[in-house]
Amino acid sequence: MTRRVAVASLARPAEMFDRDREWRALSAFATDPAAGATLGVVSGRRRQGKTFLLRALCQATGGFYFAADEGTDRESLNRLGAVLADHLGAPAPFVFDTWHSAIDALLALGRDRRIPVVIDEFPYLVRANPQLPSIIQNALAPLRAERDTSRTSLLLCGSAMSFMGQLLSGNAPLRGRAGFELVVPTLDHQLAAEFWEVGDLATALKVNAIVGGTPAYRREFARDDSPAGPDDFDPWVLRTVLSPTSPLFREARYLLADEPELHDLGLYHSVLAAIAAGNAQRGGIASYLGRKSGDLAHPLTVLEDCGLIAREPDVFKDNRTTFRIAEPLVTFYHAVMRPIWSDLEHTRDATRLWQRSQRRFAGNVLGPHFEQVCRHWIRHLAPPDLLGDYPNVVGVGTVNDAANRIAHEVDVVAFGLDDDDRRPLIALGEAKWGETMGLGHLDRLRRIRALLAAQNRYGAADARLVCFGGAGFTEELVAAADQDHGVVLVGLADLYRRA
Protein backbone atom coordinates (compact mmCIF):
# COMPACT_ATOMS: atom_id res chain seq x y z
CA MET A 1 0.00 0.00 0.00
CA THR A 2 1.33 3.45 -0.96
CA ARG A 3 1.74 5.73 1.99
CA ARG A 4 0.73 9.32 1.48
CA VAL A 5 3.07 12.01 2.72
CA ALA A 6 1.52 15.24 3.99
CA VAL A 7 2.33 18.22 1.79
CA ALA A 8 2.45 21.76 3.14
CA SER A 9 -0.24 24.07 1.82
CA LEU A 10 0.74 26.30 -1.07
CA ALA A 11 1.49 29.92 -0.27
CA ARG A 12 -1.81 31.75 -0.07
CA PRO A 13 -2.17 34.69 -2.51
CA ALA A 14 -1.77 37.95 -0.60
CA GLU A 15 -4.75 39.55 -2.34
CA MET A 16 -7.13 36.73 -1.42
CA PHE A 17 -9.77 37.55 1.21
CA ASP A 18 -10.62 34.69 3.55
CA ARG A 19 -11.18 31.39 1.64
CA ASP A 20 -8.54 29.75 3.87
CA ARG A 21 -10.43 26.48 4.04
CA GLU A 22 -11.00 26.39 0.28
CA TRP A 23 -7.37 27.24 -0.49
CA ARG A 24 -6.03 24.53 1.85
CA ALA A 25 -8.36 21.96 0.30
CA LEU A 26 -7.38 22.88 -3.25
CA SER A 27 -3.69 22.91 -2.31
CA ALA A 28 -3.91 19.42 -0.83
CA PHE A 29 -5.73 18.09 -3.90
CA ALA A 30 -3.31 19.73 -6.34
CA THR A 31 -0.20 18.43 -4.54
CA ASP A 32 -1.46 14.97 -3.59
CA PRO A 33 1.60 12.66 -3.81
CA ALA A 34 -0.45 9.57 -4.68
CA ALA A 35 0.02 7.98 -8.09
CA GLY A 36 -2.60 8.20 -10.83
CA ALA A 37 -4.78 10.94 -12.25
CA THR A 38 -7.50 12.29 -9.96
CA LEU A 39 -10.76 14.14 -10.54
CA GLY A 40 -12.27 17.00 -8.55
CA VAL A 41 -15.40 19.13 -8.90
CA VAL A 42 -15.65 22.79 -7.85
CA SER A 43 -19.01 24.56 -7.84
CA GLY A 44 -20.78 27.53 -6.32
CA ARG A 45 -22.93 30.42 -7.40
CA ARG A 46 -21.48 32.99 -9.77
CA ARG A 47 -19.31 35.83 -8.46
CA GLN A 48 -18.04 33.89 -5.41
CA GLY A 49 -14.39 33.84 -6.50
CA LYS A 50 -14.10 30.30 -7.92
CA THR A 51 -12.18 31.47 -10.98
CA PHE A 52 -9.83 33.54 -8.83
CA LEU A 53 -9.09 30.52 -6.64
CA LEU A 54 -8.46 28.19 -9.57
CA ARG A 55 -6.34 30.65 -11.55
CA ALA A 56 -4.28 31.33 -8.43
CA LEU A 57 -3.86 27.59 -7.92
CA CYS A 58 -2.58 27.13 -11.46
CA GLN A 59 -0.22 30.09 -11.14
CA ALA A 60 1.19 28.73 -7.89
CA THR A 61 1.81 25.26 -9.33
CA GLY A 62 2.44 25.83 -13.02
CA GLY A 63 -0.90 24.18 -13.74
CA PHE A 64 -3.10 24.48 -16.82
CA TYR A 65 -6.27 26.58 -16.84
CA PHE A 66 -8.89 26.52 -19.58
CA ALA A 67 -12.05 28.65 -19.48
CA ALA A 68 -14.76 27.34 -21.76
CA ASP A 69 -17.03 29.60 -23.78
CA GLU A 70 -20.55 29.08 -25.03
CA GLY A 71 -19.98 27.66 -28.48
CA THR A 72 -20.07 24.61 -30.69
CA ASP A 73 -18.24 21.42 -29.82
CA ARG A 74 -15.77 21.90 -32.67
CA GLU A 75 -14.96 25.47 -31.66
CA SER A 76 -14.32 24.41 -28.05
CA LEU A 77 -11.92 21.67 -29.15
CA ASN A 78 -10.09 24.17 -31.36
CA ARG A 79 -9.81 26.67 -28.50
CA LEU A 80 -8.54 24.03 -26.12
CA GLY A 81 -5.89 23.01 -28.67
CA ALA A 82 -4.76 26.63 -29.05
CA VAL A 83 -4.65 27.35 -25.29
CA LEU A 84 -2.82 24.09 -24.55
CA ALA A 85 -0.24 24.78 -27.27
CA ASP A 86 0.35 28.24 -25.83
CA HIS A 87 0.77 26.74 -22.34
CA LEU A 88 3.39 24.27 -23.60
CA GLY A 89 5.12 26.72 -25.92
CA ALA A 90 4.29 24.66 -29.02
CA PRO A 91 4.79 26.37 -32.40
CA ALA A 92 1.25 25.62 -33.61
CA PRO A 93 -2.13 24.83 -32.06
CA PHE A 94 -2.88 21.20 -31.30
CA VAL A 95 -5.67 19.61 -33.30
CA PHE A 96 -8.07 17.35 -31.44
CA ASP A 97 -10.60 15.38 -33.48
CA THR A 98 -12.52 14.23 -30.40
CA TRP A 99 -12.73 14.88 -26.68
CA HIS A 100 -11.21 11.42 -26.13
CA SER A 101 -7.88 12.61 -27.50
CA ALA A 102 -8.25 16.03 -25.83
CA ILE A 103 -8.75 14.53 -22.35
CA ASP A 104 -5.82 12.17 -22.87
CA ALA A 105 -3.66 15.19 -23.79
CA LEU A 106 -4.67 16.82 -20.50
CA LEU A 107 -3.79 13.64 -18.61
CA ALA A 108 -0.41 13.65 -20.34
CA LEU A 109 0.39 17.01 -18.73
CA GLY A 110 0.85 15.13 -15.46
CA ARG A 111 3.19 12.48 -16.80
CA ASP A 112 6.23 13.80 -14.90
CA ARG A 113 4.70 15.49 -11.85
CA ARG A 114 1.49 16.26 -10.02
CA ILE A 115 -0.19 19.17 -11.77
CA PRO A 116 -3.67 20.74 -11.55
CA VAL A 117 -5.62 20.98 -14.81
CA VAL A 118 -8.72 23.18 -14.61
CA ILE A 119 -11.67 23.20 -16.99
CA ASP A 120 -13.75 26.19 -15.96
CA GLU A 121 -17.37 26.75 -17.07
CA PHE A 122 -17.62 23.01 -17.69
CA PRO A 123 -21.43 23.16 -18.21
CA TYR A 124 -20.87 25.11 -21.44
CA LEU A 125 -18.92 22.19 -22.91
CA VAL A 126 -21.51 19.63 -21.83
CA ARG A 127 -24.30 21.70 -23.32
CA ALA A 128 -22.57 21.34 -26.70
CA ASN A 129 -21.55 17.71 -26.12
CA PRO A 130 -23.64 15.80 -23.54
CA GLN A 131 -21.30 12.80 -23.86
CA LEU A 132 -18.38 14.64 -22.26
CA PRO A 133 -18.94 13.36 -18.68
CA SER A 134 -18.99 9.79 -20.02
CA ILE A 135 -15.82 10.45 -21.99
CA ILE A 136 -14.07 11.66 -18.83
CA GLN A 137 -15.44 8.68 -16.93
CA ASN A 138 -13.86 6.30 -19.43
CA ALA A 139 -10.60 8.27 -19.54
CA LEU A 140 -10.26 7.82 -15.76
CA ALA A 141 -11.19 4.14 -15.75
CA PRO A 142 -9.13 1.89 -13.42
CA LEU A 143 -6.11 0.10 -14.96
CA ARG A 144 -6.14 2.42 -17.97
CA ALA A 145 -2.53 3.27 -18.76
CA GLU A 146 -3.20 6.94 -19.55
CA ARG A 147 -4.74 7.35 -16.11
CA ASP A 148 -2.28 5.26 -14.12
CA THR A 149 0.81 6.93 -15.57
CA SER A 150 -0.59 10.43 -15.10
CA ARG A 151 -0.53 12.64 -12.02
CA THR A 152 -2.97 15.18 -13.38
CA SER A 153 -5.42 16.62 -10.86
CA LEU A 154 -8.35 17.37 -13.17
CA LEU A 155 -10.75 19.99 -11.79
CA LEU A 156 -14.13 20.60 -13.39
CA CYS A 157 -15.72 23.90 -12.37
CA GLY A 158 -19.10 25.47 -13.01
CA SER A 159 -21.68 27.90 -11.66
CA ALA A 160 -24.86 26.29 -12.99
CA MET A 161 -25.84 24.82 -9.63
CA SER A 162 -28.56 22.50 -10.93
CA PHE A 163 -26.11 20.94 -13.39
CA MET A 164 -23.12 20.76 -11.04
CA GLY A 165 -25.26 19.29 -8.28
CA GLN A 166 -26.19 16.38 -10.54
CA LEU A 167 -22.69 15.77 -11.89
CA LEU A 168 -21.75 13.29 -9.14
CA SER A 169 -25.21 12.13 -8.08
CA GLY A 170 -27.31 9.03 -8.67
CA ASN A 171 -26.35 7.24 -11.87
CA ALA A 172 -24.33 10.14 -13.29
CA PRO A 173 -21.28 8.93 -15.26
CA LEU A 174 -18.76 10.63 -12.98
CA ARG A 175 -20.22 9.27 -9.76
CA GLY A 176 -17.46 7.31 -8.04
CA ARG A 177 -14.71 8.85 -10.15
CA ALA A 178 -14.20 12.09 -8.20
CA GLY A 179 -11.98 12.16 -5.13
CA PHE A 180 -12.60 15.83 -4.35
CA GLU A 181 -15.67 18.06 -4.24
CA LEU A 182 -15.69 21.70 -3.18
CA VAL A 183 -18.64 24.08 -3.01
CA VAL A 184 -17.46 27.69 -2.67
CA PRO A 185 -20.03 29.45 -0.46
CA THR A 186 -20.96 33.07 -0.12
CA LEU A 187 -19.38 35.00 2.75
CA ASP A 188 -21.43 35.01 5.94
CA HIS A 189 -22.61 38.31 7.42
CA GLN A 190 -19.54 38.68 9.64
CA LEU A 191 -17.05 38.15 6.82
CA ALA A 192 -19.14 40.29 4.46
CA ALA A 193 -18.98 43.26 6.86
CA GLU A 194 -15.20 42.88 7.04
CA PHE A 195 -14.90 42.51 3.27
CA TRP A 196 -17.04 45.57 2.55
CA GLU A 197 -15.20 47.45 5.33
CA VAL A 198 -18.43 48.67 6.93
CA GLY A 199 -17.82 49.48 10.59
CA ASP A 200 -21.34 50.48 11.66
CA LEU A 201 -23.13 47.20 12.40
CA ALA A 202 -26.65 48.29 11.44
CA THR A 203 -25.33 49.59 8.12
CA ALA A 204 -23.36 46.37 7.61
CA LEU A 205 -26.50 44.27 8.03
CA LYS A 206 -28.49 46.48 5.67
CA VAL A 207 -25.77 46.17 3.02
CA ASN A 208 -25.73 42.41 3.58
CA ALA A 209 -29.52 42.27 3.16
CA ILE A 210 -29.10 43.71 -0.35
CA VAL A 211 -25.90 42.22 -1.78
CA GLY A 212 -25.33 39.25 0.54
CA GLY A 213 -21.84 37.84 0.76
CA THR A 214 -20.88 37.78 -2.92
CA PRO A 215 -17.31 39.15 -3.21
CA ALA A 216 -17.56 40.31 -6.83
CA TYR A 217 -20.39 42.69 -5.97
CA ARG A 218 -17.93 44.93 -4.17
CA ARG A 219 -14.79 44.52 -6.27
CA GLU A 220 -16.12 44.47 -9.84
CA PHE A 221 -19.76 45.57 -9.64
CA ALA A 222 -19.57 48.44 -7.13
CA ARG A 223 -15.92 49.27 -7.92
CA ASP A 224 -15.02 49.20 -4.21
CA ASP A 225 -17.76 51.69 -3.33
CA SER A 226 -18.88 50.99 0.24
CA PRO A 227 -21.12 53.09 2.51
CA ALA A 228 -18.96 55.43 4.54
CA GLY A 229 -21.38 55.23 7.47
CA PRO A 230 -25.09 55.24 8.39
CA ASP A 231 -25.71 58.57 6.65
CA ASP A 232 -24.17 57.25 3.44
CA PHE A 233 -26.30 54.10 3.19
CA ASP A 234 -29.17 55.62 1.20
CA PRO A 235 -26.82 57.51 -1.17
CA TRP A 236 -24.88 54.24 -1.62
CA VAL A 237 -28.05 52.37 -2.60
CA LEU A 238 -28.90 55.11 -5.11
CA ARG A 239 -25.46 55.18 -6.73
CA THR A 240 -25.04 51.40 -6.93
CA VAL A 241 -27.92 48.93 -6.95
CA LEU A 242 -30.59 51.47 -8.02
CA SER A 243 -28.45 53.13 -10.67
CA PRO A 244 -29.08 51.91 -14.25
CA THR A 245 -25.37 52.50 -14.97
CA SER A 246 -24.29 50.02 -12.29
CA PRO A 247 -23.90 46.29 -13.10
CA LEU A 248 -25.79 45.58 -9.87
CA PHE A 249 -28.92 47.12 -11.36
CA ARG A 250 -29.66 44.16 -13.68
CA GLU A 251 -27.69 41.46 -11.91
CA ALA A 252 -30.72 39.74 -10.34
CA ARG A 253 -32.20 39.25 -13.81
CA TYR A 254 -28.95 37.84 -15.15
CA LEU A 255 -28.67 35.37 -12.28
CA LEU A 256 -31.79 33.63 -13.53
CA ALA A 257 -30.75 33.82 -17.17
CA ASP A 258 -27.47 32.06 -16.27
CA GLU A 259 -29.31 28.92 -15.17
CA PRO A 260 -29.92 26.59 -18.13
CA GLU A 261 -32.73 24.74 -16.33
CA LEU A 262 -34.92 27.85 -16.10
CA HIS A 263 -36.70 27.72 -19.45
CA ASP A 264 -39.78 29.81 -18.63
CA LEU A 265 -38.12 32.81 -17.01
CA GLY A 266 -41.43 34.64 -16.61
CA LEU A 267 -42.84 31.86 -14.46
CA TYR A 268 -39.75 31.66 -12.27
CA HIS A 269 -39.63 35.42 -11.78
CA SER A 270 -43.29 35.32 -10.73
CA VAL A 271 -42.62 32.54 -8.20
CA LEU A 272 -39.74 34.56 -6.73
CA ALA A 273 -41.88 37.70 -6.67
CA ALA A 274 -44.55 35.81 -4.71
CA ILE A 275 -42.02 34.66 -2.12
CA ALA A 276 -40.48 38.13 -1.87
CA ALA A 277 -43.96 39.55 -1.23
CA GLY A 278 -44.29 37.35 1.85
CA ASN A 279 -46.01 34.30 0.39
CA ALA A 280 -43.72 31.69 1.90
CA GLN A 281 -45.95 28.62 1.51
CA ARG A 282 -46.98 26.79 -1.64
CA GLY A 283 -50.65 27.74 -1.26
CA GLY A 284 -49.84 31.42 -0.95
CA ILE A 285 -47.49 31.29 -3.94
CA ALA A 286 -50.16 29.53 -6.00
CA SER A 287 -52.77 32.13 -5.04
CA TYR A 288 -50.37 34.96 -5.96
CA LEU A 289 -49.83 33.38 -9.39
CA GLY A 290 -53.44 32.35 -9.92
CA ARG A 291 -52.47 28.71 -10.33
CA LYS A 292 -53.16 25.42 -8.62
CA SER A 293 -50.80 24.44 -5.83
CA GLY A 294 -49.87 21.20 -7.59
CA ASP A 295 -48.65 23.14 -10.63
CA LEU A 296 -45.79 24.61 -8.58
CA ALA A 297 -44.02 21.37 -7.66
CA HIS A 298 -41.70 21.47 -10.67
CA PRO A 299 -40.75 25.19 -10.69
CA LEU A 300 -40.13 25.15 -6.94
CA THR A 301 -37.90 22.09 -7.25
CA VAL A 302 -35.96 23.62 -10.13
CA LEU A 303 -35.41 26.88 -8.24
CA GLU A 304 -34.25 24.89 -5.23
CA ASP A 305 -31.84 22.82 -7.34
CA CYS A 306 -30.43 26.06 -8.76
CA GLY A 307 -29.79 27.37 -5.25
CA LEU A 308 -32.12 30.33 -5.72
CA ILE A 309 -34.61 29.29 -3.05
CA ALA A 310 -34.36 27.22 0.11
CA ARG A 311 -37.04 24.85 1.37
CA GLU A 312 -37.53 25.03 5.16
CA PRO A 313 -39.72 22.40 6.81
CA ASP A 314 -41.70 23.52 9.84
CA VAL A 315 -39.90 21.90 12.78
CA PHE A 316 -43.20 21.33 14.59
CA LYS A 317 -45.48 20.40 11.66
CA ASP A 318 -44.42 17.67 9.24
CA ASN A 319 -46.85 18.76 6.52
CA ARG A 320 -45.91 22.45 6.49
CA THR A 321 -43.03 23.87 4.46
CA THR A 322 -41.97 27.43 3.83
CA PHE A 323 -39.76 28.78 1.07
CA ARG A 324 -37.30 31.65 1.17
CA ILE A 325 -35.13 33.23 -1.49
CA ALA A 326 -31.50 32.24 -0.93
CA GLU A 327 -29.90 35.14 -2.82
CA PRO A 328 -30.42 38.54 -1.10
CA LEU A 329 -30.04 40.55 -4.30
CA VAL A 330 -32.89 38.56 -5.87
CA THR A 331 -35.09 39.32 -2.86
CA PHE A 332 -34.25 43.03 -3.10
CA TYR A 333 -34.95 43.05 -6.82
CA HIS A 334 -38.37 41.44 -6.50
CA ALA A 335 -39.45 43.26 -3.34
CA VAL A 336 -38.17 46.74 -4.18
CA MET A 337 -37.03 47.11 -7.78
CA ARG A 338 -39.36 45.02 -9.93
CA PRO A 339 -42.58 46.83 -8.88
CA ILE A 340 -41.09 50.17 -10.00
CA TRP A 341 -38.73 48.88 -12.71
CA SER A 342 -39.86 51.18 -15.51
CA ASP A 343 -39.56 54.25 -13.28
CA LEU A 344 -36.07 53.20 -12.16
CA GLU A 345 -34.93 52.76 -15.75
CA HIS A 346 -36.08 56.21 -16.84
CA THR A 347 -35.78 58.50 -13.84
CA ARG A 348 -32.87 60.87 -13.50
CA ASP A 349 -32.98 60.74 -9.71
CA ALA A 350 -34.31 57.66 -7.89
CA THR A 351 -34.31 59.35 -4.46
CA ARG A 352 -38.08 59.63 -4.18
CA LEU A 353 -38.59 56.14 -5.57
CA TRP A 354 -36.26 54.76 -2.90
CA GLN A 355 -37.99 56.77 -0.18
CA ARG A 356 -41.37 55.36 -1.22
CA SER A 357 -39.92 51.85 -1.09
CA GLN A 358 -38.78 51.99 2.53
CA ARG A 359 -41.73 50.00 3.89
CA ARG A 360 -41.17 47.17 1.38
CA PHE A 361 -37.45 47.24 2.10
CA ALA A 362 -37.96 47.00 5.86
CA GLY A 363 -40.78 44.45 5.81
CA ASN A 364 -39.90 42.23 2.87
CA VAL A 365 -36.11 42.47 2.77
CA LEU A 366 -34.56 43.56 6.07
CA GLY A 367 -36.88 41.70 8.45
CA PRO A 368 -36.68 38.27 6.80
CA HIS A 369 -32.95 38.66 6.22
CA PHE A 370 -32.34 39.51 9.87
CA GLU A 371 -34.26 36.41 10.92
CA GLN A 372 -32.15 34.24 8.61
CA VAL A 373 -28.93 35.81 9.94
CA CYS A 374 -30.07 34.97 13.47
CA ARG A 375 -30.74 31.35 12.54
CA HIS A 376 -27.36 31.05 10.84
CA TRP A 377 -25.60 32.64 13.81
CA ILE A 378 -27.23 30.40 16.43
CA ARG A 379 -26.38 27.32 14.35
CA HIS A 380 -22.82 28.10 13.28
CA LEU A 381 -21.35 31.16 15.00
CA ALA A 382 -22.77 31.45 18.51
CA PRO A 383 -20.56 30.78 21.56
CA PRO A 384 -20.59 27.03 22.38
CA ASP A 385 -22.00 27.54 25.88
CA LEU A 386 -24.79 29.95 24.90
CA LEU A 387 -27.59 27.38 24.91
CA GLY A 388 -26.04 24.79 27.19
CA ASP A 389 -25.93 22.32 24.29
CA TYR A 390 -24.73 22.25 20.70
CA PRO A 391 -27.55 23.22 18.27
CA ASN A 392 -27.82 20.30 15.88
CA VAL A 393 -30.87 21.56 13.96
CA VAL A 394 -32.10 25.15 13.65
CA GLY A 395 -35.25 26.14 11.82
CA VAL A 396 -38.62 27.86 11.97
CA GLY A 397 -41.82 26.53 13.51
CA THR A 398 -45.51 27.08 14.10
CA VAL A 399 -47.24 26.37 17.43
CA ASN A 400 -51.02 26.32 17.73
CA ASP A 401 -52.58 28.14 20.66
CA ALA A 402 -56.11 26.77 20.84
CA ALA A 403 -57.07 28.81 23.91
CA ASN A 404 -56.30 32.08 22.14
CA ARG A 405 -57.30 30.78 18.69
CA ILE A 406 -54.01 31.79 17.09
CA ALA A 407 -50.92 30.14 15.66
CA HIS A 408 -47.56 31.41 16.91
CA GLU A 409 -44.79 31.74 14.32
CA VAL A 410 -41.39 31.08 15.90
CA ASP A 411 -38.47 32.71 14.08
CA VAL A 412 -35.70 30.57 15.59
CA VAL A 413 -36.07 27.04 16.95
CA ALA A 414 -32.98 25.10 18.00
CA PHE A 415 -32.71 21.38 18.79
CA GLY A 416 -29.78 19.53 20.29
CA LEU A 417 -28.81 15.87 19.89
CA ASP A 418 -28.33 13.61 22.89
CA ASP A 419 -26.50 10.27 23.21
CA ASP A 420 -29.71 8.37 22.46
CA ASP A 421 -30.15 10.21 19.15
CA ARG A 422 -33.10 12.15 20.56
CA ARG A 423 -33.44 15.84 19.73
CA PRO A 424 -34.21 17.94 22.80
CA LEU A 425 -35.65 21.40 22.19
CA ILE A 426 -32.98 23.75 23.53
CA ALA A 427 -34.06 27.23 22.40
CA LEU A 428 -36.96 29.30 21.13
CA GLY A 429 -36.17 32.69 19.63
CA GLU A 430 -37.85 35.79 18.27
CA ALA A 431 -36.04 38.22 15.96
CA LYS A 432 -37.06 41.86 15.56
CA TRP A 433 -35.10 44.22 13.36
CA GLY A 434 -36.91 47.54 13.58
CA GLU A 435 -38.43 47.63 17.06
CA THR A 436 -37.01 47.65 20.57
CA MET A 437 -37.75 44.33 22.22
CA GLY A 438 -39.49 44.32 25.59
CA LEU A 439 -41.24 42.12 28.11
CA GLY A 440 -44.10 41.51 25.70
CA HIS A 441 -41.81 39.60 23.38
CA LEU A 442 -40.46 37.55 26.28
CA ASP A 443 -43.98 36.76 27.50
CA ARG A 444 -44.88 35.50 24.04
CA LEU A 445 -41.90 33.14 24.04
CA ARG A 446 -42.82 31.93 27.52
CA ARG A 447 -46.34 31.19 26.31
CA ILE A 448 -44.99 29.20 23.36
CA ARG A 449 -42.65 27.26 25.62
CA ALA A 450 -45.54 26.41 27.95
CA LEU A 451 -47.63 25.17 25.04
CA LEU A 452 -44.81 22.91 23.83
CA ALA A 453 -44.18 21.63 27.35
CA ALA A 454 -47.89 20.77 27.62
CA GLN A 455 -47.47 18.71 24.45
CA ASN A 456 -44.66 16.80 26.20
CA ARG A 457 -42.19 18.06 23.63
CA TYR A 458 -38.81 16.68 24.72
CA GLY A 459 -36.70 19.41 26.36
CA ALA A 460 -39.33 22.13 26.04
CA ALA A 461 -39.66 22.87 29.76
CA ASP A 462 -35.98 23.87 29.97
CA ALA A 463 -35.60 25.49 26.55
CA ARG A 464 -33.88 28.85 26.63
CA LEU A 465 -35.70 31.91 25.35
CA VAL A 466 -33.66 34.07 22.99
CA CYS A 467 -34.53 37.62 21.95
CA PHE A 468 -32.65 38.84 18.88
CA GLY A 469 -32.94 42.62 18.80
CA GLY A 470 -31.68 44.68 15.89
CA ALA A 471 -32.85 47.86 17.65
CA GLY A 472 -31.93 46.82 21.21
CA PHE A 473 -33.90 45.97 24.33
CA THR A 474 -35.88 47.80 26.99
CA GLU A 475 -34.42 48.19 30.48
CA GLU A 476 -37.15 45.89 31.85
CA LEU A 477 -36.17 43.10 29.45
CA VAL A 478 -32.49 43.51 30.28
CA ALA A 479 -33.34 43.27 33.98
CA ALA A 480 -35.42 40.14 33.38
CA ALA A 481 -32.55 38.50 31.48
CA ASP A 482 -30.13 39.38 34.31
CA GLN A 483 -32.38 37.55 36.79
CA ASP A 484 -33.08 34.48 34.64
CA HIS A 485 -30.21 32.58 33.00
CA GLY A 486 -32.79 30.93 30.74
CA VAL A 487 -33.38 34.24 28.96
CA VAL A 488 -30.76 35.25 26.39
CA LEU A 489 -30.50 38.65 24.69
CA VAL A 490 -28.62 38.82 21.38
CA GLY A 491 -27.92 42.22 19.84
CA LEU A 492 -26.03 43.32 16.74
CA ALA A 493 -22.74 43.41 18.63
CA ASP A 494 -23.21 39.72 19.48
CA LEU A 495 -24.14 38.76 15.93
CA TYR A 496 -20.99 40.40 14.58
CA ARG A 497 -18.55 39.36 17.31
CA ARG A 498 -16.02 36.94 15.87
CA ALA A 499 -15.39 33.83 17.94
Image (tube, helix red, strand yellow):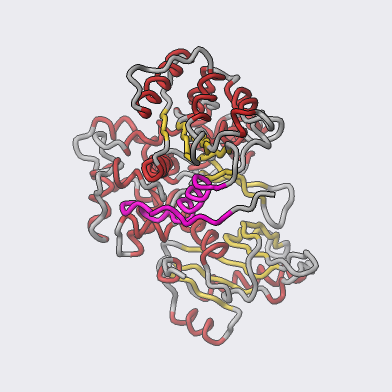
Q: Nearer the viewer, residue 121 or 299?
A: 121
**451 relative position to 162: left or right:** right
Furthest residue toward bottom: 483
Residue extent of the magenta highlight:
5-33
- Residue 17 lies in what quarter of the image? bottom left
Q: Nearer the viewer, residue 449 or 130?
A: 130
**200 relative position to 382: left or right:** left
Asked if the stretch drawn in magenta spans residue 195, the answer is no
Image height check: is 124 above or below 160? above
- Residue 12 lies in what quarter of the image? bottom left
Q: Is residue 47 visible?
A: no
* Residue 23 picture location, percent across and down: 45, 51
* Residue 400 picture location, percent across and down: 70, 59
* Residue 77 picture location, percent across and down: 46, 17
* Residue 55 picture location, percent across and down: 38, 40
Q: Nearer the viewer, residue 129 or 378?
A: 129
| Residue lying at 34% horizontally and 44% vertically, measured from the top left | 217
Q: Main secondary structure of the magenta part?
A: loop
The count of marks equals 0
Image height check: is 392 above or below 137? below
| Residue lying at 58% horizontally and 36% vertically, measured from the top left | 37
| Residue lying at 60% horizontally and 19% vertically, measured from the top left | 131
Q: Is residue 216 visible?
A: yes
- Residue 41 lies in what quarter of the image? top right
Asked if the stretch drawn in magenta spans residue 8, the answer is yes
